[in-house]
Image (tube, rainbow, N blue to C red):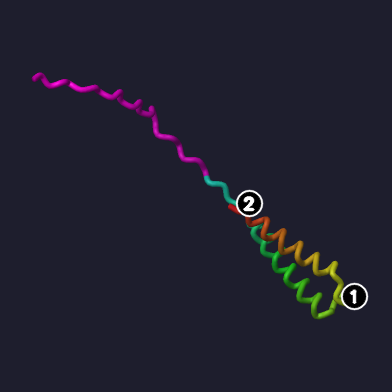
């Protein structure tokens, strides 16, 4: 019985040239300093609020300002490169 030649698969086209690597984007130094300082200032404001150093006693507005500073610092980590 004769043997069949089989079916040849078409070859894949080869790329003409290798892709050029893209330059990596990095965050500036001030961004990192601002990110960590916002988190640190937020923690300090919360601690000073509970100690009662701020005028008005332990007001919730100072607590919210401290939490907003910490949250802003953590949100900045999303765009850090």
- Of the numbered discs 1 and 2, the one sitting upstream in the chain is 1
Residue 70 — which label? Answer: none
Residue 58 in picture, x, y percent from top left: 85, 75
Q: Secondary structure at mark 2?
A: helix
Disc 2: which residue: 79
Residue 59 in picture, x, y percent from top left: 87, 72
Q: Nearer the viewer, residue 65 or 15?
A: 65
Which picture quadrant has residue 38? bottom right
Disc 1: which residue: 55
Q: Nearer the viewer, residue 52 or 8?
A: 8
Considering every residue shown, the one lying at the far front of the view is: 1
Considering every residue shown, the one lying at the far right of the view is: 56
Residue 25 in picture, x, y percent from top left: 57, 47
Residue at the spot 85% in from the left edge and 67% down from the top edge: 61
41 within the magenta span: no
Alpha carbon separation for disc pair 1 and 2: 36 Å
Classified by dominant secondary structure, the portion drawn in magenta counts as loop
Residue at the spot 70% in from the left edge and 68% down from the top edge: 40
| 22 relative to 34, above or below | above
Tell me which segment is drawn in magenta.
1-23
Q: How many marks?
A: 2
């Amino acid at each position: 019985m004769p043997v069949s030649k089989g079916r040849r698969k078409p070859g894949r086209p080869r790329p003409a040239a290798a892709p050029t690597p893209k330059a990596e984007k990095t965050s500036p130094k001030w961004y990192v300093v601002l990110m960590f300082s916002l988190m640190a200032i937020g923690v300090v404001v919360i601690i000073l609020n509970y100690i009662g150093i701020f005028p008005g006693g332990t007001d919730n507005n100072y607590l919210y300002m401290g939490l907003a500073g910490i949250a802003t610092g953590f949100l900045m980590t999303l765009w850090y490169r």
